[in-house]
Structure formats: structure tokens, C-alpha cells
Image (cartoon, rainbow, N blue to C red):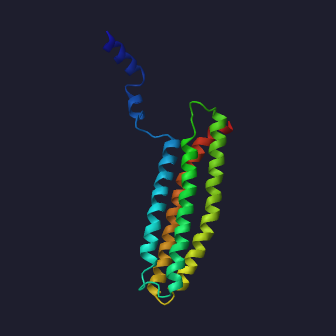
Amino acid sequence: MVSNNYSRAWSSMGNGSFNSNFNPDRKTALEKLAAMYRRFMTVALILVPYSWLTFTRPNLIENSTGRILLPILFSLYALSAFLIDRYLYHGIRGIDCFRMTVKEVGERAYRLRRIHLRSICFLVPVIIVFIGLLGYYVVSNIYFIYGMVAGSVIGVMIGLWNLRKFMVEYKMLTDNEEG
């Protein structure tokens, strides 16, 4: 009896087409944003010791001032990126769709989106200055300069791709608030 009712209900939904569209493992926009921020936090923390291992090598940078200045500046950059991503991660994790109204969720997501974009306005000029300083200290190694240019181009493309992914998820959160 129960299986007959179940079968009839299932067939009334379009011969099981509901099953093909439903994915219980699908993540929400909040979960995707939190996962992306967590990934970016991890990368930023990994970059701190990496900068000390890379920029303090005497065969890369012969100037002793550069061997001290570059890892300090890059570590500060990576730590500030980590702190910004950590703040945004906890802000996203603090959004509770069950206790907050749709308007509150949209407003908080919009505020976090603005903070994200402002942090980009801060971090991009800082990394451009850092790349300029790095080029100044390794100007004698033309292949390193070529690698910096290629890495910068690839980094910009990856950064824009990730920014688009972030903005799509933020749009999913703020679209319902506008209506």
C-alpha cells in the first residue's frame, strides 16, 4: 500500500524527473563562499614561510637590504590578506538564514561584498609595489624578470577568475533581498 502510494506520487512528479534535478550534496552560496575564504586563508598562511625561504637566498638577491626587506614586506602582505579573509570568513559563517530575515542576510552579504572589494583596492597596489621592489633587487637576472612578468599575467587572470566566482556567490545572496 505504501509503496503503491509512493510510486504514484513519484510518477506524478514527471516520471522521476525530480530525482534528476535534486542533489542533496549541493552546497549553498554561503557554504561556497566560506570554503573559498578558508582556502584563501590557508594559501596566505603558507606564503609567509615560503617568502622567508625564497627571498633570503643570497643567490637570488645579492643586496642584504633586499634579503631583509622583501620577506618582511611580503609576510606583512600575506598576513594582512589572511586577516581580511579571516574576517570575511567569519562574517559569512555568522550569517544564519534560519534566524535572520532575508533582508538582514542580504544586507550583511552586501556589506561583506563591499569589504571584499575594498580589500582588493588595498591589496592590489601593495603587491604592485612589492613586484616593483622585487624587480629592482633582481634587475641583473633577466630570466627572473621574465618569470615575474609571466607570473603577474597568470596571477591577474587567476585573480579575475576567482573574483568572478566570489561575485557570483555574493549575487546569489543579495538577489533575493532586492525584490
Total labels drawn: 0
* Quadrant (top left/top right/bottom left/bottom right) for the C terminus: top right
* Quadrant (top left/top right/bottom left/bottom right) for the N terminus: top left
Relative depth, front residue between 14 and 99? 99
Name the residue: 43% across, 85% down. 58
Name the residue: 51% across, 52% down. 37
Q: Position of residue 111 (x, y in %)?
A: 66, 47
- From this viewpoint, which residue is outermost toward the top? 1
Name the residue: 50% across, 47% down. 34
- From this viewpoint, which residue is outermost toward the bottom? 140
Relative vertical location of residue 8 with respect to residue 65 in this rendering, above or below: above
Relative vertical location of residue 76 with respect to residue 41 in this rendering, above or below: below
Q: Position of residue 98 (x, y in %)?
A: 56, 30
Q: Position of residue 46 (x, y in %)?
A: 44, 63
Relative vertical location of residue 130 with respect to residue 48 in this rendering, above or below: below
